[in-house]
Image (cartoon, grey):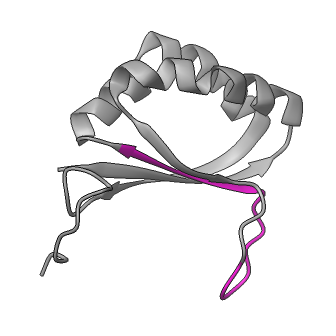
């Protein structure tokens, strides 16, 4: 079953974060993740939101996510993400094997 990573970021060193961003796709590619959303100006529909960016990434399964997250390549670039932004990340379980699939919600 697919899973998602939802990250909310508050920038503290934009140059460091941009270094991370520049290498992100190359590092993620071997792990079959898909960046679905990376928005630095989301429209707040309800409540207060004091972050600078929201990111949503899909992986085919939790194992793929864990392999990516613990890989040497990701750990190397993650230093710039950690220096560049205060981040709250959530791992979410999906309903389907792909973000393109249409399925009924879990009961």
Residue 8 in view here: no
Estimate the x, y position of residue 72 in percent, counting from the top left: 46, 11
In the rendered image, the vertical position of residue 14 relative to residue 52, given as above or below: above
Q: Tell me: 32 left or right of 61.
A: right
Which quadrant would the C terminus be assigned to in this image? bottom left
Q: Position of residue 89 (x, y in %)?
A: 52, 51
- Left/right placement of residue 106 relative to residue 43 reads left
Residue 47 part of the magenta segment: yes
Looking at the image, which residue sits at the far left? 107
Name the residue located 34 percent from the left edge and 35 percent from the top edge: 65
Looking at the image, residue 66 sits to the left or right of residue 61; the answer is right
The x, y position of residue 60, in whole percent, is 26, 41
Q: Residue at x 74, y 42 (%)?
A: 85
- The quadrant holding residue 84 is top right
Outermost residue, bottom direction?
46
x and y percentages locating residue 105 in the rendered image: 19, 77
Give above or below for 85 relative to 48.
Answer: above
Which residue: 68% across, 32% down?
81
Q: Characterize the magenta stretch by its predominant secondary structure.
A: loop
Residue 19 against residue 102 in the figure, above or below: above
Q: Which residues are magenta?
A: 44-58
Q: Residue at x 68, y 33 (%)?
A: 82
Q: For residue 16, say whether it is visible.
A: yes
The mark tally for this picture is 0
78 sits left or right of 39 in the view? left
């Amino acid at each position: 079953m697919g899973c998602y990573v939802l990250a909310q970021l508050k920038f503290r060193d934009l140059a460091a974060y941009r270094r991370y961003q520049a290498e992100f796709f190359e590092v993620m590619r071997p792990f079959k993740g898909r960046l679905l959303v990376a928005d630095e100006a989301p429209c707040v529909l309800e409540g207060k939101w004091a972050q600078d960016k929201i990111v949503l990434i899909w992986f085919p399964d939790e194992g793929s996510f864990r392999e990516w997250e613990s890989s040497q390549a990701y750990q190397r670039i993650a230093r710039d993400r950690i220096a560049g932004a205060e981040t709250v990340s959530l791992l979410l379980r999906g309903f389907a094997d792909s973000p393109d699939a249409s399925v009924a919600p879990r009961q």
